[in-house]
Image (cartoon, rainbow, N blue to C red):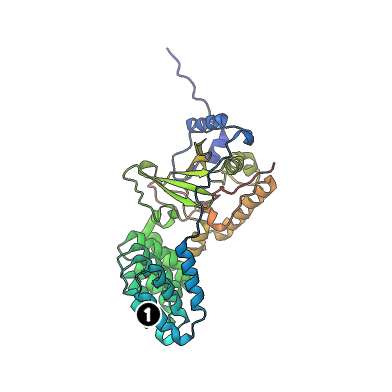
Amino acid sequence: METQPTAEKKPDFLKMYEIPGQEKISEHSFERYLKDKEDFPKDTEKISKEVPLLYQKHTTKSSLEKEASREKTKDLHVDEIPDFVKKGLSEDDPEMQKTAIETIGGARSKIRSALLQEAFEIRNEEIQLACVKAISNIPEEERVGFIRIGLSKESFPVKKASVKMIQYSPKELRSKLIKQGLLGEDLELRKEYAKAIHSAPTEKERKELLDLAKKKLGNALIEPPLYDNAEISSDRFSREEFAKTGSGTTLIGGELKDKVIFRHITPEAFLSWQEAYENHEVWKRAGFNYVPIEPIFSFHQNKNGLIDVASGVLDISFKDWKKMSGDFSEELEKEEIKIRTVLNESGIIHGHPHRGNFCLRFFRKENGDADFSKKPRIYLIDFDRAISPE
């Protein structure tokens, strides 16, 4: 009788690379990572450093004209501002119209609302966004009315911006506005109302609103902002790129949505990321039972000299979670400090380790729902500016 081959025991450290709620990392996937590493030059001098400046910012003629127009408004007398605003709003140039709207805050308080009302009638998304931004310059007792005007517009970015302005509304009305929004029908807009919970004036109100948000949003409450402005769905495979300072990211749709993204970063930054990611023994000694670094699934150098990294998708940033909730904040802050300390002692400079680059990953129940009763894990992401010791 043939004997079945004994399955090789997986190394215990692989458990440190598992992400709660996602498929467990397998020996095969880790072997792929090691194969990628074997094929990757270890000497950075051998790595192509002719990395193109893909995401440069340019000073345009229109931006210079806009700045000149703004300078001109500084010389206006307060009683000249209404005519300046009306003239600017009558122009066909959106930049001139936006400059006019930005000037409303310099007018006398009693006339500002009438000027903003006139500006809101322009049917242009850019102009309406500028109007929403100007709501904070309107007398406080009139701001809710303008927030509702913004919410009545067809443009989702305008609605989204209007929800953010709740923080400038009278304190006694904020919780009511947020609650109404959380009970609305639009899921994406409910997510924006959840982000406004931090503006509720008391801890009791914030807790009640968070409990409602958990009930009405579930996992959507802790989705990362990666997909906020992208047309990416889990229904079909697709790619969408967006640029950020120093690097780029490609979002993936279909079955890989919420699981994998591709980052495109310089070789030097990647090697620092890789060093922090692989050092599971250091993280274990620091008291972690997982590696608190953005997961790397695979990588290779592309024809432009950048490193294409398939990395794991996590949940909401610690910064956004802390705005909504105080749950586990004290423990997570201690772990955040510990991550910074380990990197410093290892000589790895992340470059921008602000709280927005610390992301959480919540544990999931058997049905896939986030378990809000358990402290989530915290990870440091976005190593595009990282530097390691020579």
**Relative vertical location of residue 34 with respect to residue 253 in this rendering, above or below:** above
> Where residue 204 sits in the image (x, y, percent)?
47, 71
- Amino acid type, residue under disc 1 in the picture: Lys
Residue sitting nearer the eye, 381 or 20: 381
> Where residue 304 sits in the image (x, y, percent)?
51, 39
Q: Residue at x 49, y 73 (%)?
A: 70
Residue 126, quarter of picture: bottom left
Residue 145 seen: no
Residue sitting nearer the eye, 68 or 118: 68
Residue sitting nearer the eye, 15 or 306: 306
> Where residue 183 sits in the image (x, y, percent)?
33, 66
Q: Residue at x 68, y 46 (%)?
A: 347
| Residue beneath disc 1 | 86
Q: Residues within 10 Å of mark 1 (few under 14, many from 20)?
A: some
Q: Secondary structure at mark 1?
A: helix
> Where residue 190 sits in the image (x, y, percent)?
36, 63
**Relative vertical location of residue 344 with respect to residue 91 in this rendering, above or below:** above
Residue 151 seen: yes
Q: Residue at x 58, y 60 (%)?
A: 330
The quarter of the rendered structure image containing the N terminus is top left
Residue sitting nearer the eye, 125 or 318: 125
Q: Position of 368 compared to 56: left or right?
A: left
